[in-house]
Every structure is written in C-alpha cells, then in structure tokens.
Amino acid sequence: MCNMQKHFTLLRCFGNKVITAIHQPEFMPWAGFFQKMYLAEQFIILDHVQFKKRYFENRNKIVSPQGEVSYITVPVISKNKFTQAINAVKVDSQQQLWKQKILNKIKHYYSKSKYFNLYFSELEDLFESFNSNKLIDLNIAIINFFRHHLNISTPMIYSSSLSVEHFYASDLIFEICRKQSASIYLCGVSGRDYLNVGDFDNHSILVEWLEYKAPKYKQLSSTFFPYMSTLDLLFNHGDNSLNILLHQ
C-alpha cells in the first residue's frame, strides 16, 4: 500500500470522515484523475461549469511505439458558444467518421501493446454504440470503462444536480463541499492559486493537497512519456494498472 493510500485509510478509521474530490469530466482522463477518485469517498463531476476549448474535456494524449505524442480529439460544436456549460456541449456529428478516426488512431498506436486485445473490442463497442449528441455522455461512459477495469467504485455525483448558487473558483468548491457534508477536500496543487482555505478552515473542512507525480512505467516507446491518457497505462499493464496508478 502506498503512503498516500495508507494516509487516507487511516483518516477513514477516525470518525465519520467524508473525503470529497471534485473534477471536470475529462475525455480519456490521465492517471491523476483516477487516483483522486480512488482516494475519495465521493467524487463530484463538475459538469455545470464553463467548457474550456482546447483543453482536456474533449481530447487527451497518447503515445506511439516510436515516441510520437498526439491528441485524440472528439469534435464539438463550440463556435459562438463561448460560455456554454460542459453538460451542454454537443458532439459535432457533421464531422463524418469521427469515431472511426479515434479508434483507428488508438489501434495504430497500441495494437502491439500487451493488453490491447483484452480491452480494445470493448472500447470499440462503446464508441460504435454511442448515440447521444452530448459530449458528457461519452466522457462518462469512458470514465466508467476505466472505473470498471481499475476496480474503482467511488460514487459519482453531478454538480448540476446540487443546485449550487456560485459558479466560480473557491466559492463554488466551498459550496459543493458544504452541501455534501465534506470533512476533507482533496485538491490539486493548482488550487493554491485560487482556493480560499480560510473558508474551509472556518467550517472544519480539511484541505488535503494532492501533488500527483506520474509514475514511470513500461510503454511501447523506448523513451517514457508521462501524463498520457490512462488508456496508455491500461493497454500496457492490464490489471496491474491500479497498483501503478497508486505508485505501489
């Protein structure tokens, strides 16, 4: 068991500690996303905030055996929709064969990986059966694909279901934590730039800073590239992926 996992296991042993994490629903998330989810007792899907164009809500990185890092991207309708919420973003179905382009690129990059045949057909079925026009539906389906194979069962709650009044930065996070009776909030180190820790302290909510350092593991590439989609980890290490993700 890694030191961080031991730490949170001990926290759960002392009283009713509700460990809460909050994150936007990314496309093909990286390992740090799932480490945070694993450590939490409730994971809030931040789906009602503004969509960030050219960020990780509709794309993520993979690496080829030759060491070529590239994005796989879901085309979305964003023109003149500068303030649309993540849960309102629609897939641009006018871009023909977008699903096949993503699958072909994944296959091209990972067909020689050790566990490719174990997972690819399921992923292929997921894309081919996807018939919603909303990006979030695809992202959640893929997140659940990873959760299943990483054995993560942390409950997920949509922020849009919580009737929050604030929409920005620290006030929003603080309101969600209070509504969900959080006693511990897991926050990435970037939160130091905007989080008003005093509000949390005044309401006995402990802020735990998570600085996730990507573990080094064997890839098809001879040079290691960190911060890839968790797809890279799963295809290369199968059912040992969670242990690597947790740095065990």
Image (cartoon, rainbow, N blue to C red):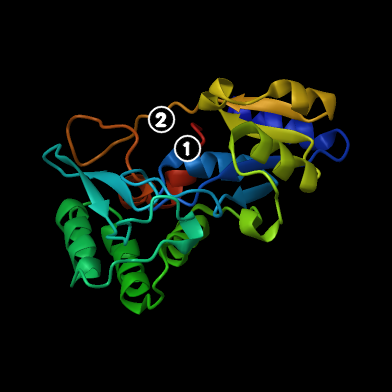
Q: With respect to residue 7, does 234 lie above or below?
A: below
Whichever of labels 1 and 2 marks the residue nearer the N terminus, that label is 1
Q: In terms of image quadrants, where is residue 142?
A: bottom left
Q: Position of residue 36 (x, y in %)?
A: 57, 39
Q: Position of residue 167 (x, y in %)?
A: 61, 44
Name the residue beneath numbered marker 1: 32
Name the residue beneath numbered marker 2: 214
- Visible in this render: residue 97? yes
Is label 1 in contact with label 2 (beta carbons under 8 Å)? yes
Which residue extends farthest left? 66
Q: With respect to residue 101, does 239 lie above or below?
A: above
Find residue 40 and name its label.
none
Q: Position of residue 64 (x, y in %)?
A: 17, 44
Residue positioned 35% across, 35% down in the render: 227
Residue positioned 44% across, 46% down in the render: 240
79 with respect to 150 (left or right): left
- What kind of residue is marked 2? Ala
